[in-house]
Amino acid sequence: MSHTVVLEDDTLFDAATQDGRTPNAQIEYWAQLGKFVEESGYFDLQKVHLAFQGKLPISELTGAEKEIHTRLLWDALEDLDGSEDPEFFDRLKAAGIPAYGLKKNGIIIKN
């Protein structure tokens, strides 16, 4: 039986085209793998999301869950540029909290 699924993440589709399978076969493979991992009890993505939201101590995550938590955190930090809240860095500075950035030439700056 065939069904149509819409992916909102172009990077997921692009990644699915690079592993030697058809995009459909690759996404089915990932879905089966994810189902297996969830059912194994070794990895719980819900716990990772709770820890990411600060609702669960990181110490309660398994090693694999901590790795994904770190990856999610790193991705979120990479996206943090203040563009969604122009006064964000001003509030940090006023509160005495240092903020660091990276110039286009790779030089680290402190706000």
Image (cartoon, helix red, strand yellow):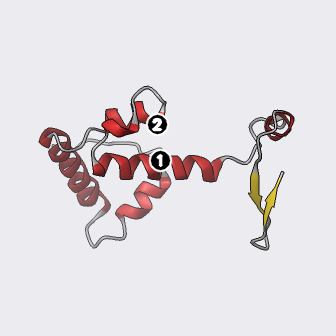
**Circle on res. 42:** none
Label 2 environment density (alpha carbons within 10 Å; few <14, some 14–19, many ≥20): some
Label 1 environment density (alpha carbons within 10 Å; few <14, some 14–19, many ≥20): some
Residue 76 lies, in percent from the top left, at 57, 46
Type of residue at label 2? Answer: Phe
- Residue at the (44%, 26%) spot, across then down: 55
Q: Earlier in the sequence, mark 2 or mark 1?
A: 2
| Residue 107 quadrant | bottom right
Residue 50 lies, in percent from the top left, at 40, 30
| Residue 20 quadrant | bottom left
Split into 4 quadrants, where in the image is the N terminus? top left
Residue 95 lies, in percent from the top left, at 81, 33
Q: Is 4 on the left or on the right of 94, as rendered? A: left
**Circle on res. 72:** 1
- Residue at the (15%, 46%) spot, across then down: 36
- Residue at the (81%, 38%) spot, across then down: 96
Whether pointer 2 and pointer 1 mark residues with C-beta atoms closer than 8 Å, the reply is yes
Name the residue tied to disc 2.
Answer: 52
